[in-house]
Image: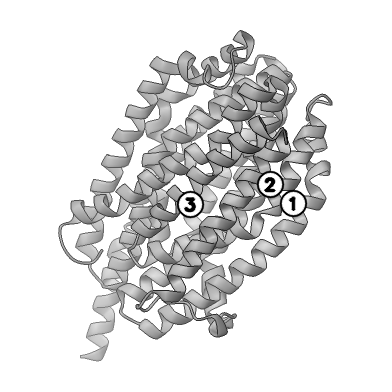
Amino acid sequence: MTEGKIYSRITLFALPIFIGQLFQQMYNIADSLVVGKVLGKQSLAAVSSSGSLIFLIVGFIYGVFVGAGVVIGRYYGAQKNDMVHRAVHTTVAFGLAAGAFLTVFGITCTPFILRLMNTPADVLPESIAYFRVYFAGSVGMVLYNSFNGIFQARGDSRHPLYYLIIASCTNVVLDILFVKYLGFGIVGAAAATAISQFLSAGISFYKLTHVNDVHRVTLREIGFDLELLKEILATGLPTGVQNSVIGLANVIVQTNINAFGSDAMAGCGAYFKVEGFAFLPVTSFSVALTTFTSQNLGAKKYDRVKKGTVFGLLSGVLLAELVGVLFVLLAPQLIGLFTKAPEVIAYGVRQARTEALFYCLLSLSHCMAGVIRGAGKTTVPMLVMLICWCVIRVTYITVAVKLVPNITVIFWAYPLTWTLSSIAFTIYYFKADWIHNFERREAALLNKKS
């Protein structure tokens, strides 16, 4: 990422992530498609309530892996191979510990959390069953994300793509087998996901233990380097806190949606599954910009960072908006893939036509946050998203729904808060002049040495 043409490096890095996220999204919607068609709208509602709760619980740990990727990428760009080696093994150790914790927490706390979310009584039993089996696969899910972070920090986005394709295809096949032919019901859908997660983690681990490079994993060396763990946590904790708080805000949003009944849950759940496709350019360019920024700052190539930021922001924003326009035009057909119930489709279409044209602002916020995280300044995105996507979003919904008890009021919470975060990031990017701070610090060090 520190050599060659900027646009080709970022694009070639982002493209496998884009394709991988496409398969990840297929992986995510397979449960809903099969469950909705085979088991009906009540079971679809049970699965549809999963997104915000899963993000709440998983988001914190995933955020720490963002920090690990930034640290590994910076040391790799600076060609400090010993530090890369130590950071990789600390990341794997943390993944094992976090996965074990998440398994216990998810299985034991799921009923309590679902009740707090006002999950309707007719949906609650299946929701609990789905979540408990899903979280039984937490170790596989967390380890895959930790391995994925290692590959991407090294500049390798191809191998995670291959493993994700294998896992996604496996998940679809198992979904159909378990739910449609073996009659395992909603538990079968969750089991298919858990098995696929362990498969992707296993293949990734095998590759990392056999690669002939600085990021190779050796079993006997997996353990915590306390100094590097502190550095990883210092970089990743703000993102982890940000993800968890945003997840909490989305749980509150989901709680308000649940109050409108199981049809609203199923329709909005179908919308969120389709919305995941809008995150494809958002995620791919955000991750690419984080890796690109961390490696080039480590290599002290500041002009390259500035040029890469402009290209990445424009690409992510334009592609996200294109997806949004297509979603608005095709909303009835896309939501109709999950169910034939007209009342359920109506909720999903209404949400799509309220939010989708604002995906450009969602992408702008995430891509700018990716650049800033790559510079190691993870507190800034945390504060912006905490204030805009949590405090303001929750306050708005709490007040607005009481004044106007209409579900469209809830839908408007997203475009409004995406707009606010985009304004905040734009002001910070142009006013803080943080890249020049790196340049001035480097010049000061050179003057001191001379």
429 lies left or right of 26 = left
Q: Which mark is residue 134?
A: 2
Disc 3 crowd rating (10 Å Cα; few below 14, some 14-19, many 20+) is many
Q: Quadrant of residue 110?
A: top right
Residue 157 appears in the picture as rendered: no
Residue lying furthest bottom in this view?
450
Q: Residue at x 37, y 79 (%)?
A: 214
Q: Residue at x 32, y 41 (%)?
A: 316
Q: Secondary structure at mark 1?
A: helix
Whole-percent x, y for residue 318 in the image: 29, 34
Q: Earlier in the sequence, mark 2 or mark 1?
A: 1
Closest to the observer, 374 or 115: 115
Q: Quadrant of residue 373?
A: bottom left
Q: Which residue is mark 3?
A: 381
Q: Earlier in the sequence, mark 1 or mark 3?
A: 1
Query: Where, quadrant-wise, is the N terminus in this rendering?
Result: bottom left
Callout 2–callout 1 Cβ contact below 8 Å: yes
Q: Which mark is residue 106?
A: 1
Q: How many numbered tags mark residues here?
A: 3
Disc 2 crowd rating (10 Å Cα; few below 14, some 14-19, many 20+) is many
Callout 1–callout 3 Cβ contact below 8 Å: no
Give the CA separation, mark 2 to mark 1.
9 Å
Whole-percent x, y for residue 38 in the image: 65, 24
Residue lying furthest front in this view?
181
The residue type indicated by label 3 comes to Pro
